């Protein structure tokens, strides 16, 4: 695996970008930074290239990929006209952390869409991603660049850890900004349906298109603490994770008690907290993901913190949760998956 270093280089490194683009054009696999998380890219029109994405990640074949392009002009080759509300969202949020689900014309590699009549399209805003997409001039299918079952990578080292030796190249653009994946919106329906909350919040969508539907799967707030949640396997850390939603002293008290319970069972215990509460806990490992008062910092640091617990061998992780509003709706969606539904609400 070749590694091109473009960290701190806003314009990217043109010769290196051309090299990476040539690898993609030749059907190779290249991981690259976007403003959300790192993506693992391949030519979306090549069935062989796309098949190698699934092999490298160990990804189930029935999970469709997002196609990345540098601008809207060439899109009409692969997708039909954008519905009116899709156009409004694209105008406002592209380039940016928004994926639109659109009807396709059947000329992308079939595995990209996993047999669905629709495809997810996104124009990322990361300068290195845009420069790479411009240089290769082909649509790039790119899921998050993690091994299946690991959190999405927010740093080049995460990709290296998961995929070194399994992919052709890695463009290192430093840490990503948003930290959770793009917001996925199905605009083939009216009102549009929010399928995955991410860097663009539901309120930001509503501001542009008025009413939106929320995929009912996203709204279930409290799960039975012991529900196995098999369908949430995707983002789970190796340890058993619990999320406790609340605030202030009461939250700190419950998080510490739950951590103590793990310790009594002889588990290696980690606590996931915020700067505001960091010095109030005692456990094997206390990790700070951001500032509670600034949800964007929590989104940015979440996956790195989860990976840190994995690397350390945490067996029991107790996390501070957040009232699911704004960016915290996206954060809690990822935390609930990581915890396989073990979300406890206190103080209600
Ligand atoms: O921020 C992101 O979106 C990152 C960066 C690399 O762009 N990509 C990413 O890709 O998170 P991935 O494959 O990890 O997640 C794609 C999500 C999945 O939940 C998939 O099921 C959904 O998008 N998706 C893709 N195509 C779809 C379609 N036609 N209909 C419904 N959902 C779709
Ligand atoms: Mg993913």
Image: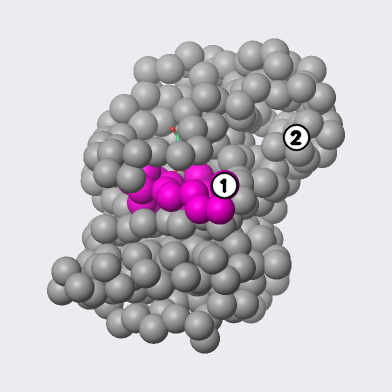
Instruction: Check the image and report above or below for 66 versus 88.
Output: below
Of the numbered discs in the image, which one, if any, rests on residue 205?
2
Label 1 belongs to which residue?
A: 348
Instruction: Check the image and report above or below for 214 versus 336.
Output: above
For label 1, count other residues whose C-alpha is less than 10 Å away and answer few (under 14), some (14-19) or many (20+). few
Image-based side of 111 in relation to 87, left or right: left
Of the numbered discs in the image, which one, if any, rests on residue 115?
none
- Report, in whole angstroms, how far the alpha carbon at label 2 lies from the one at label 1: 29 Å
Relative depth, front residue between 135 and 29: 29
The answer to whether residue 59 is visible is no
Q: Going 50% across and 38% down the picture, which residue do you hit?
A: 221
Q: Going 28% across and 39% down the picture, which residue do you hit?
A: 227
Secondary element at tag 1: loop
User: Where is residue 88, by image quadrant?
Assistant: top right
Q: Give residue 224's position: percent from left, percent from top.
A: 34, 39
Q: Range of the magenta residues?
A: 332-348
């Amino acid at each position: 695996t070749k590694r091109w270093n473009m960290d701190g280089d806003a314009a990217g490194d043109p010769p290196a970008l051309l090299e990476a683009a040539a690898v993609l054009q030749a059907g190779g696999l290249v991981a690259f930074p976007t403003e959300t998380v790192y993506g693992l890219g391949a030519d979306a029109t090549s069935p062989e290239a796309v098949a190698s994405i699934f092999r490298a990640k160990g990804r189930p074949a029935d999970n469709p990929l997002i196609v990345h392009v540098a601008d809207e002009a060439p899109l009409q080759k692969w997708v039909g006209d954008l519905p009116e509300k899709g156009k409004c969202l694209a105008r406002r949020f592209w380039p940016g952390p928004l994926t639109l689900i659109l009807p396709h014309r059947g000329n992308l590699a079939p595995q990209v869409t996993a047999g669905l009549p629709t495809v997810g399209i996104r124009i990322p805003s990361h300068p290195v991603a845009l420069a790479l997409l411009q240089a290769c001039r082909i649509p790039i299918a790119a899921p998050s660049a993690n091994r299946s079952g690991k959190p999405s990578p927010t740093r080049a080292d995460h990709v290296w850890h998961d995929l070194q030796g399994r992919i052709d190249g890695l463009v290192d653009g430093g840490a990503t900004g948003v930290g959770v994946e793009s917001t996925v919106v199905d605009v083939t329906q009216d009102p549009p349906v929010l399928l995955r909350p991410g860097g663009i919040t539901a309120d930001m969508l509503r501001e542009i298109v008025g009413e939106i539907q929320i995929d009912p799967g996203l709204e279930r707030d409290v799960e039975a603490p012991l529900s196995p949640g098999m369908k949430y396997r995707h983002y789970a850390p190796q340890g058993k994770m619990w999320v406790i939603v609340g605030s202030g002293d009461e939250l700190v008290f419950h998080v510490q008690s739950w951590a103590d319970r793990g310790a009594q069972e002889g588990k290696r215990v980690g606590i996931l907290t915020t700067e505001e509460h960091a010095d109030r806990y005692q456990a094997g490992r206390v990790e700070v993901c951001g500032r509670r008062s600034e949800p964007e910092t929590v989104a940015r640091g979440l996956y790195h913190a989860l990976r840190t617990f994995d690397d350390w061998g945490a067996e029991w992780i107790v996390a501070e949760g957040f009232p699911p509003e704004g960016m915290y709706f996206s954060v809690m969606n990822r935390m609930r998956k990581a915890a396989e539904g073990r979300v406890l609400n206190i103080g209600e």
